[in-house]
């Protein structure tokens, strides 16, 4: 069954300028359970806009967003927020970890907020950190970690509450190429270990080719790549 379905999504930004650009012009996409999809396009094509609409952080001008079969389009803000918290995990180019907390705490806290016991939250955090090879760094604050380590901790945090859908926007975009490669592998291990669905935006075609499927965002629409 499908975890995410976008149908006929359109979006433009009202900038007040006469020749306003329509960023999305009827984007359609289905992501099945367990599927990992690369979203490729050059910078400025509308990848972040599409991810924010898919993750219920922004609303489309028209079209339909379904998450786990539920039409979210006309739902209240409250219902959309609840679904986002329960079902969606976000990863960004820059990590947004809480600087005053350790790596472990950064992964424990969202679980406590979600009603998980401290013991279970810590066990899960340690297991996630081990999966991405940062287990030994659990007690360090973000500032004491390398850029690649910080990104890996952020991946663990995004997956802490076991979302059904992971949305990632250039997840290795701020790392040098060698580091990016290894850190991307860590992300793939995490995603495959949980069986979740993922939509991962990147302009790196080599990374995109390592995912199960590739869609290209071009002229505001999504096209399957062979
Ligand atoms: P990408 O993630 O592919 O770089 P974005 O979705 O960030 O693309 O942006 C797509 C286009 O929409 C760009 O031309 C960008 O300048 C414009 N845009 C994005 N956000 C806004 C906004 N809040 N207001 C006005 N224009 C925006
Ligand atoms: P919480 O308060 O539990 O973190 P939120 O609804 O604020 O839940 O956010 C859920 C997810 O969406 C978080 O991963 C957060 O980083 C991200 N998020 C929330 N608002 C924005 C925003 N305006 N832009 C980008 N990401 C956001």
Image (cartoon, grey):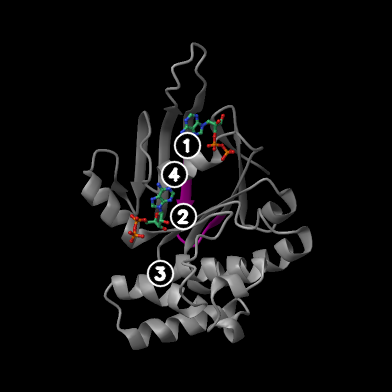
Along the viewing direction, whichever of 188 and 69 lies nearer the viewer: 188
Q: Is residue 12 above or below residue 85?
A: above
Q: Is mark 3 within 8 Å of ligand 2?
A: no
Mark 1 or 4 closer to N-term? 1
**Spot occupied by residue 131 in the image (x, y as percentages of width and height):** 58, 79
For disc 1, the neighbor class at 10 Å (few under 14, some 14 to 19, many from 20) is some
Q: Label 2 near label 1: C-beta < 8 Å? A: no
Q: CA distance from mark 1 to mark 4?
A: 15 Å
For disc 2, the neighbor class at 10 Å (few under 14, some 14 to 19, many from 20) is some
Quadrant assignment for the N terminus: bottom left
Secondary structure under the numbered disc 4 in the rendered image: helix
Quadrant assignment for the C terminus: top right
Q: Is 34 colored magenta in this rendering?
A: yes
Query: Which residues are drawn in magenta?
Result: 29-36
Q: Please, what is the dominant secondary structure of the magenta stretch?
A: strand
**Spot occupied by residue 62 in the image (x, y as percentages of width and height):** 36, 29
For the image shown, how many numbered marks are present on the structure? 4
Mark 1 or 3 closer to N-term? 1
Q: Which residue is mark 1?
A: 28
Q: CA distance from mark 4 to mark 2?
A: 19 Å
Q: CA distance from mark 1 to mark 2?
A: 13 Å
Mark 3 or 2 closer to N-term? 2
Q: Is 73 colored magenta in this rendering?
A: no
Q: Which residue is mark 2?
A: 32
Q: Which mark is residue 52?
A: 4
Q: Which of the two discs, 1 and 3, sits closer to the camera?
A: 3
């Amino acid at each position: 069954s499908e975890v995410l379905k976008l149908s006929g999504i359109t979006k433009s930004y009202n900038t007040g300028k006469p020749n306003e650009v329509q960023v999305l012009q009827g984007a359609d996409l289905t992501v099945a359970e367990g599927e990992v999809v690369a979203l490729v396009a050059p910078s400025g094509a509308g990848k972040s806009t599409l991810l924010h609409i898919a993750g219920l952080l922004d609303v489309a001008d028209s079209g339909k967003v379904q998450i786990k079969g539920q039409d979210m389009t006309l739902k209240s803000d409250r219902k959309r927020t609840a679904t986002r918290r329960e079902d969606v995990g976000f990863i960004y180019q820059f990590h947004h970890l809480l600087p005053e907390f350790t790596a472990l705490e950064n992964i424990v806290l969202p679980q406590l907020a979600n009603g998980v016991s401290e013991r279970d939250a810590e066990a899960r955090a340690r297991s996630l950190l081990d999966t991405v090879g940062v287990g030994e760094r659990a007690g360090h604050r973000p500032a004491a970690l390398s850029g690649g380590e910080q990104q890996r901790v952020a991946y663990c945090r995004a997956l802490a509450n076991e979302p059904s859908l992971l949305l990632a926007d250039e997840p290795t975009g701020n790392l040098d190429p060698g580091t990016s490669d290894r850190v991307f592998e860590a992300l793939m291990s995490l995603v495959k270990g949980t069986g979740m669905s993922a939509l991962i935006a990147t302009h790196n075609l080599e990374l995109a080719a390592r995912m199960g499927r590739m869609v290209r965002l071009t002229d505001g629409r999504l096209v399957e790549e062979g």
